[in-house]
Image (tube, rainbow, N blue to C red):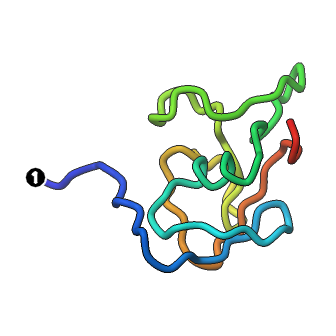
Amino acid sequence: MRSSRLPRASGSAMVEVTVDGDPVQAYPGETVATVLLAAGRRTFRHTDHLHAPRGLFCGMGVCFDCLVTVDGQANVRACMTPVRAGMIIETGGSSDA
């Protein structure tokens, strides 16, 4: 049976990803949400109607509050997506929210 778990983040060489135009270091296999939180990003997007800030809430892919754009693909769950070298991550949040 195939596991649906994310790959374990390696403790070896870090890779570079881009978050809202800024280079950020990450470990391959850790989630996009982990990288965003480590980079000080608490708001990943804002709701369409009330523009309320949203970020990591459930951490297991159920609530969809952590949606970001990855490599041009919108509505990607940050908590379920492992990072890889060169990934471009765009949030609708701010760096200090």
The image position of residue 95, as x and y in percent, is: 86, 47
Task: Tell me: residue 15, above or below residue 49.
Answer: below
The quadrant holding residue 90 is bottom right
The image position of residue 85, as x and y in percent, is: 58, 78
Q: Residue at x 21, y 51 (%)?
A: 3
Q: Nearer the viewer, residue 11 or 26?
A: 11
Q: Which of 11 and 89 is in front in this view?
A: 11
Q: How many labels does the image show?
A: 1
Q: Which residue is drawn at 35% across and 59% down?
A: 8
Amino acid at circle 1:
Met
The image position of residue 34, as x and y in percent, is: 58, 49
Task: Tell me: residue 66, above or below residue 76.
Answer: above
Instruction: Name the image quarter holding the C terminus.
Output: top right
Q: Residues within 10 Å of mark 1 (few under 14, many from 20)?
A: few
The answer to whether residue 8 is left or right of residue 54 is: left
The image position of residue 82, as x and y in percent, is: 49, 60
Task: Tell me: residue 63, above or below residue 74.
Answer: above
Q: What element carries label 1?
A: loop
Q: Residue at x 66, y 70 (%)?
A: 25
Residue tagged 1: 1
The quadrant holding residue 88 is bottom right
The answer to whether residue 6 is left or right of residue 38 is: left
